[in-house]
Amino acid sequence: MTTPSSKKRVLSGIRATGRLHLGNYLGAVKGMLELQDKSEYETFYMVADAHAITTPYDTKTLAQNRKEVILDYLSAGLDPAKSVIFVQSMVPAHFELSHYLGSVISVNRMLHLPTYKEKVKQYSDESSMALLNYPVLMAADILAYKAEAVPVGVDQEPHLEIARQIARNMNTKFGTDFPEPKIFETVGKYIPSLLGDGKMSKSVDGSFINLTDDPDTIALRLAKVPTDSGRGESVPIKGSVANLLFFVELFQGSEDRKKYEDMYLSSGIRYSELKMDLAKAIFSVVEPIQKKRIEMVKILDDVINDGAKRAGNVASQTLLEVKQKMGF
Ligand code: TYM
């Protein structure tokens, strides 16, 4: 098989299900940004619109949602001069490859994935074959580029395990040369929910702050975070107060966190002040992204069309190699 260029390849994606929140930004986009600036990597970043149809969705908003994700990427600093930025469904080789890869992994393995079980619980009447096949399509997304590094949050690790298993099985059975892709983690690899339990998630109201939120919305969302009396014998290590302190550390630094921890053990924290400062700090991170968004609209269509061509060249080459090895 042809070897990829001497650079290591990177692939990542975000589903086209709505606006990006801080979890997507800190857990995935920050990692994407870091790798696009390293000369030893060749980076491919897509919007996973085909993955968006694995749970109930609205046909009227899908096309807009995928544009919004690309706009969020560009505004956050993904650069078409450094990365191939594209829409998954515009590179049909992913879907064909997904079919071939599906032949080396068992249904049973898919049925027992925690991510699948969670979604089935959430959408019991509407769990589809596309949902069961989600991780195989994700493996195709990654292996189409022979990517070695995948900047995603830790919630995606079970899917990466499937991609590695598929890569191994393909290599053993058919002599392909897929590398085993590994997660590329950031400090924000797990951003907790504002509500205290679980992770920040688009599907849980009140759990998230969006990249496009204005200062008032951010303040309002933080105002709803449940708190305690602000004082006690030990600083909470889980729940919404612990999460607030984690956000302080992420956006204001560890010194501020320490200051609040000391206050918790002595005079007490005034949460209204903490939340006001935190809202300002969060807005200072998202504000430049929001400003850049307006300019990026102009280049959006060119980026999408160019990205589809560049990604398509690589993915169709891999597909051809796989078909030859598999005897087609
Ligand atoms: P999606 O849209 O669910 O999530 C997009 C990215 O955001 C990360 N993320 C988080 N990170 C930290 N803390 C959180 N609270 C948080 N919430 C979300 C996710 O880990 C993810 O990196 N399956 C992917 C989409 C996909 C993909 C791929 C990714 C399709 N094909 C190929 C990589 C490679 C997903 O769940 O997207």
Image (cartoon, rainbow, N blue to C red):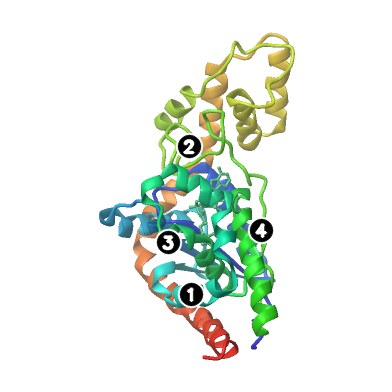
Q: Is residue 295 above or below residue 306?
A: above
Determine whether label 2 and label 4 are within 8 Å by CB: no
Q: Amino acid at mark 3?
A: Ala
Sequence-wise, which precedes: disc 2 or disc 3?
Answer: 3
Q: Which residue is tagged 1?
A: 99
Q: Secondary structure at mark 4?
A: strand
Q: Which residue is tagged 2?
A: 208
- Residue 91 image-quadrant placement: bottom left
Q: Residue at horizontal 47%, vertical 79%?
A: 312
Q: Secondary structure at mark 2?
A: loop
Residue 5 at x, y percent in the picture: 65, 82
Q: Residues within 10 Å of mark 2 (few under 14, many from 20)?
A: many
Q: Residues within 10 Å of mark 1 (few under 14, many from 20)?
A: some
Is the residue indicated by label 1 positioned so its CB lies within 8 Å of ligand 1?
no
Q: Residues within 10 Å of mark 3 (few under 14, many from 20)?
A: some
Q: Secondary structure at mark 1?
A: helix
Q: Residue at horizontal 74%, vertical 16%?
A: 234
Q: Which residue is tagged 4?
A: 183
Residue 242 at x, y percent in the picture: 64, 26
Q: Is residue 207 above or below residue 49?
A: above
Q: Which residue is tagged 3?
A: 130
Which mark is in front, 1 or 2?
1
Nearer to me, 83 or 188: 188
Residue 322 at x, y percent in the picture: 57, 84
Which mark is in front, 3 or 4?
3
Marker disc for residue 146:
none
